[in-house]
Image (cartoon, helix red, strand yellow):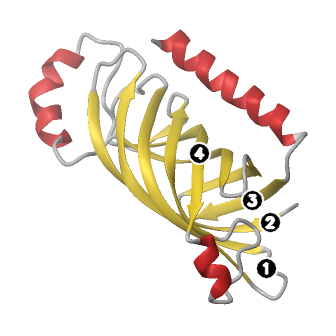
C-alpha cells in the first residue's frame, strides 16, 4: 500500500510538471493561521484545472467517531509502531482536480472570472509525511493520506486581482499507509493567496 501511494504521488507530480510546461499555469503563495503552501494551478480544459500544492501545516485525524475508536483501539496500538495523534504539523502534497461551473452565469452577471475565479467541485488527494511537530504526547504516525470529494469557491480580488480567497469543504477518507486506522472525516479549508505568476 505504501509503495502504491508513493508511486501515485510521484506520477501526479511528474504529470503536473510536464503539463505545466504546455498549459497556462497560475502560481500562488497561500496561507492561513495554521497552514502555508505554494500552489500551481493549470488548465486541463476551459472549465477544469489540476491544482497541486506543496506546503507545511496542520493535520488531524479527528473525526466524528474517532474518540470512540481511539478509546476502543488504544490497547491495540501500544505494541504497534503506529500511534494515533490527534493534531500535528507536517509537510504535505495536496493534489486537486477542480471542475469550475457556473462560469457562463458569472460572466453574464459581470463577475470577474480570471485567475480561475469561480465555484468548483472536484476531488482531492492529500498526503502528509511523518509529523514534524506533534502537539500531544504520543508517538508520531508514519505518512498518512486523505482522499475525498469537495466543493468550493476561489475568488480574485484587489486592484490588480492578484489576491485569492479560497474556501472549500467536503468529506474525505483518512488513513495511514498500513491502514492501522481508516476513518471518514469532514473537511473545511480556507486561505488567502497571492498570485506570483
Q: Residue at x 45, y 59 (%)?
A: 151
Q: Earlier in the sequence, mark 1 or mark 4?
A: 4
Q: How many marks?
A: 4
Q: Quadrant of the N terminus?
A: top left
Q: Earlier in the sequence, mark 1 or mark 3?
A: 3
Q: CA distance from mark 1 to mark 3?
A: 14 Å
Q: Is residue 168 left or right of residue 91?
A: left
Q: CA distance from mark 3 to mark 2?
A: 7 Å
- The residue that label 4 is drawn on is 97
Quarter of the view holding residue 79:
top left
Secondary structure beneath dot 3 equals strand
Q: Quadrant of the C terminus?
A: bottom right
Evaluate if marks 3 and 2 touch, with contact meaning CB atoms under 8 Å apart. no
Q: Earlier in the sequence, mark 2 or mark 1?
A: 1
- The residue that label 1 is drawn on is 161
Q: CA distance from mark 4 to mark 2?
A: 19 Å
Residue 29 numbered tag: 3
Q: Is residue 140 left or right of residue 80?
A: right
Q: Residue at x 70, y 65 (%)?
A: 116
Residue 195 numbered tag: 2
Amino acid at each position: 500500500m505504501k509503495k502504491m501511494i508513493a508511486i501515485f504521488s510521484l506520477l501526479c507530480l511528474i504529470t503536473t510538471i510536464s503539463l505545466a510546461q504546455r498549459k497556462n499555469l497560475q502560481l500562488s503563495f497561500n496561507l492561513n493561521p495554521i497552514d502555508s503552501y505554494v500552489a500551481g494551478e493549470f488548465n486541463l480544459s476551459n472549465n477544469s484545472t489540476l491544482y497541486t500544492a506543496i506546503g507545511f501545516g496542520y493535520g488531524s485525524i479527528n473525526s466524528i467517531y474517532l474518540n470512540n475508536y481511539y478509546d476502543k483501539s488504544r490497547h491495540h496500538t501500544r505494541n504497534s509502531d503506529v500511534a494515533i495523534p490527534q493534531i500535528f504539523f507536517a509537510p504535505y502534497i495536496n493534489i486537486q482536480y477542480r471542475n469550475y461551473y457556473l462560469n457562463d452565469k458569472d460572466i453574464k452577471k459581470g463577475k470577474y472570472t480570471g485567475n480561475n475565479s469561480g465555484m468548483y467541485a472536484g476531488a482531492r488527494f492529500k498526503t502528509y509525511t511523518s509529523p514534524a511537530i506533534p502537539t500531544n504526547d504520543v508517538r508520531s504516525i508514519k505518512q498518512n493520506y486523505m482522499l475525498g470529494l469537495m466543493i468550493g469557491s476561489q475568488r480574485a480580488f484587489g486592484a490588480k486581482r492578484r489576491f485569492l480567497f479560497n474556501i472549500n469543504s467536503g468529506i474525505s477518507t483518512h488513513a495511514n499507509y498500513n491502514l492501522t486506522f481508516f476513518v471518514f472525516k469532514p473537511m473545511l479549508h480556507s486561505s488567502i493567496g497571492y498570485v506570483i505568476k
